[in-house]
Amino acid sequence: MTQDVAGLLDVDSVAEYLVGQRLLEPGSAPSVAALGGGVSNVVLTVDAGPHHWVVKQSLPRLRVEREWRATQERTVHEARGLAIAASLTPRAVPRVVHLDPQRFVLVIERAPDGMLDWKGRLLGGDVDPGVALTLGQLLGRWHLATAADPGSLASVDHPEAFEQLRVTPYHRAAAAALPPCAPAIGAVVAAMAERRICLVHGDFSPKNVLTGPEGTWVIDFEVAHRGDPDFDVAFLLCHLMCKFVHLPGSRAALADAGRAFLAAYCETVGTPGWFAPDCHRAAHLGALLLARVDGASPAEYLDAADRSTVRRLGAQILAEPPDELDAVWTMAGSMLQGDR
């Protein structure tokens, strides 16, 4: 696996680049480090006096074994999505410092010290339903406000990156791997394409949530687009459900977190005309659970037994979406009890 490095920044070149963009003074010698873990971007931290930044540059090909390319314009979409979210909840997202649409570089403020990603905390058994409640309120505010102001969505009305980084590797890949489920997954994809309602984050997952003394931040808006709000809701619930299966000692707390998130979201948005019934969100959840085990980007922490349970649960929810989404936690618990 090789990556065309022409024009890509690294720890040795980023300072010169920032000076050229007039973000740093000539002769600056910032402290620079590469952040690992991501597959779709160059990600560097830069500390220079009072400036504490993250520099992101989208890759034309993701760092995975199989061929997986995506538009580098997603950097521009991320900046636009962040700007919209910041206008509504300025203390819940990083500030955009600079955007270079020619080289697909985004500079944002770095999270304050002491903020940790929520995924790590959850996998370590630290489940705080208060974080889930905050996320439900944030997501609800974004969805409600942007649905009421369609003009605000013109800058993110570009679903190409979402198709390349979510629908194709998640839904279409899972449908190809699971032919009996393919018609129902296809129906979810078709319904999602019709519901172009509000700002959708597209990667609303615990790994993109930072929590700490300074509050809660949501990051990584690179697949932000105008779309179906229920994708975001189901996406977070899917991640909590996978951890529910994987972490026996945290199941009650994870179910409480999932319920707190959904209740806060529903209370925040109310019942506008675009609000779909729970069965629509449940169908999304079922498709995403299948994608997390049989799509192109499976959840790395699930073992073989976990994957089998998540697959059966996703298929059951997708085949018969419950009228009340809270029922999925009981369904999951019953299935796990039966596996003992």
Image (spheres, helix red, strand yellow):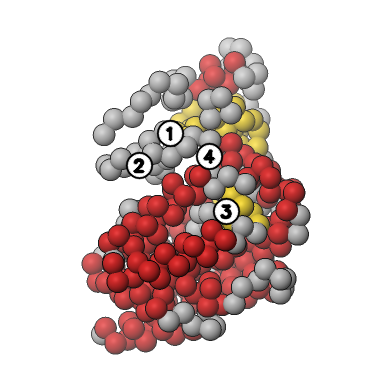
Q: Looking at the picture, how far across and down is residue 271, in whole percent?
A: 71, 74
Along the viewing direction, whichever of 245 and 148 lies nearer the viewer? 148
Q: Which residue is mark 2?
A: 68
Q: Which residue is mark 1?
A: 59
Check whether the beta carbons of the residues at disc 4 and disc 3 lie within 8 A of each other.
no
Check whether the beta carbons of the residues at disc 4 and disc 2 lie within 8 A of each other.
no
Dot 2 falls on a residue whose secondary structure is: loop
Q: Is 77 left, or right, of 63 in this rendering?
A: right
Q: Earlier in the sequence, mark 4 or mark 1?
A: 1
Foreground tag (2 vs 1): 2
Q: Is residue 117 in sight in this rendering?
A: no
* Residue type highlighted by circle 4: Arg
Q: Looking at the picture, how far across and down is residue 124, in whole percent?
A: 41, 63
Q: Is residue 277 in sight in this rendering?
A: yes
Q: Which residue is mark 4?
A: 74
Q: Which mark is residue 201?
A: 3
Q: Looking at the picture, how far across and down is residue 86, in whole percent?
A: 70, 47
Q: Earlier in the sequence, mark 4 or mark 3?
A: 4
**Quarter of the view holding residue 143:** bottom right
Along the viewing direction, whichever of 285 and 56 lies nearer the viewer? 285
